[in-house]
Image (cartoon, rainbow, N blue to C red):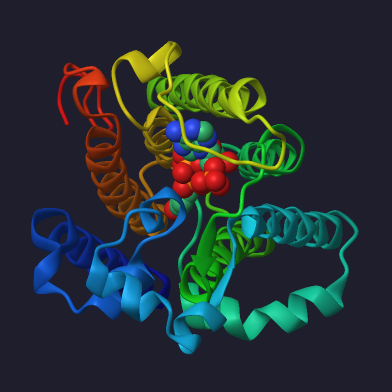
Amino acid sequence: MTLFIVLWLIASLVIGLFGLILFFDGKKLPPWLTVIYKYGKLLRDLNNEERSVSGLLLIRWIQVPKRYFSHFYGIAVILHLIVLLSSLFHVDSVRQILNTPLNLLFGAYKYDGVNVYLFFLLSMIHIFRRFIESVFIAVPSFAKINLIHYLTGIGFYISIALYNANNLFSTVLITQDRPYLYTVGLIFYVIGQVLQFHSHKILSELRRRNDKPRGKAGYYLPHGGLFEFVSCPNYFSELVIYSGLYMLTNLNANWLAILIWVYSNQIVASLLNHKWYKQAFGSRYPARRKAIIPYIL
Ligand SMILES: NC(=O)c1ccc[n+]([C@@H]2O[C@H](COP(=O)([O-])OP(=O)(O)OC[C@H]3O[C@@H](n4cnc5c(N)ncnc54)[C@H](OP(=O)(O)O)[C@@H]3O)[C@@H](O)[C@H]2O)c1
């Protein structure tokens, strides 16, 4: 087991556990912790105790605008470009700088999934698409995340870049011939991309249509596409995309740790968002809509 796996499993356990306690009985957690855990629309409806701690200087101080999500993707695109160019043009200084952290995180692990450059390209397309979406399509609001979310987001995308750097820089085993697995993985990946883009477009259109006067950023009841089945189709798509990539790595254990993190934080976030929607829209909220997985959860 690599250090990379251990770190992402611990992070998944912590985020998943706190999130589930918050979902089932938030009163079991101290209000300062629930305020730190919540972000975006979930910070809008705080109870009295949470509201009094959210006024504390320290908690306000560690909050940053949620539109800073774009930094995650911007940083990830730059890191991927550096890794790709230094691999193609044999820039030894970058390899030397990364040598120690990569050895520490991945040890003797060797990638043996679909063509290593194809995997790299697919990771980059996803990150680049999210960058474009978050800068040009999303309608930004005054919503907040805190420094812990922000640093975790940056850590996540640095991890993806390091995973890809390790694959590119180290000896790759001969790619195993798993045409069915790779085809299914690619289908998952493409469907996930289309669904996620469509869901983000629906969310941004809601604000373009309804935010009057301009500058007011509200939350509305989304309709259309997968929103007819779940409250968070963008999170569902994230699960589909990362599952597809997992198949393309030939079920690699390091990517499995990334996948567990994505499942753990997106499922918990969807449960909390689903609860928020039901409270905010009451009987107007479609009863058959689930949180994240159509007909199931
Ligand atoms: N891989 C990972 O570990 C990971 C972790 C977190 C997120 N993500 C991905 O990052 C993407 C963004 O995540 P997120 O948590 O920001 O998603 P989100 O809360 O659904 O927000 C997406 C965008 O839609 C807006 N929005 C959300 N609900 C709305 C509503 N009811 N009416 C109008 N606008 C609404 C948000 O505005 P506000 O900014 O004002 O809330 C934001 O601009 C998602 O695709 C998610 O899958 C991935």
The vertical placement of 131 against 231, above or below, is: below
Measuring 42% from the left and 71% from the top, which residue is drawn there?
A: 4
The vertical placement of 29 against 56, above or below, is: above
**Residue 135 visible within the image:** yes
Measuring 42% from the left and 15% from the top, which residue is drawn there?
A: 223
Q: Residue furthest front?
A: 213
The vertical placement of 199 against 25, above or below, is: above
Would residue 150 appear left or right of 180 to someone viewing this image?
right
Quadrant of the rendering where the C terminus is positioned: top left
The vertical placement of 158 against 279, above or below, is: below
What percent of the width, then of the height, locates residue 249?
46, 43
What percent of the width, then of the height, locates residue 136?
77, 36
Measuring 47% from the left and 75% from the top, which residue is drawn there?
A: 148
What percent of the width, then of the height, locates residue 187?
47, 19
Q: Nearer the viewer, residue 112 or 265?
A: 265
Measuring 40% from the left and 54% from the top, which residue is drawn there?
A: 44
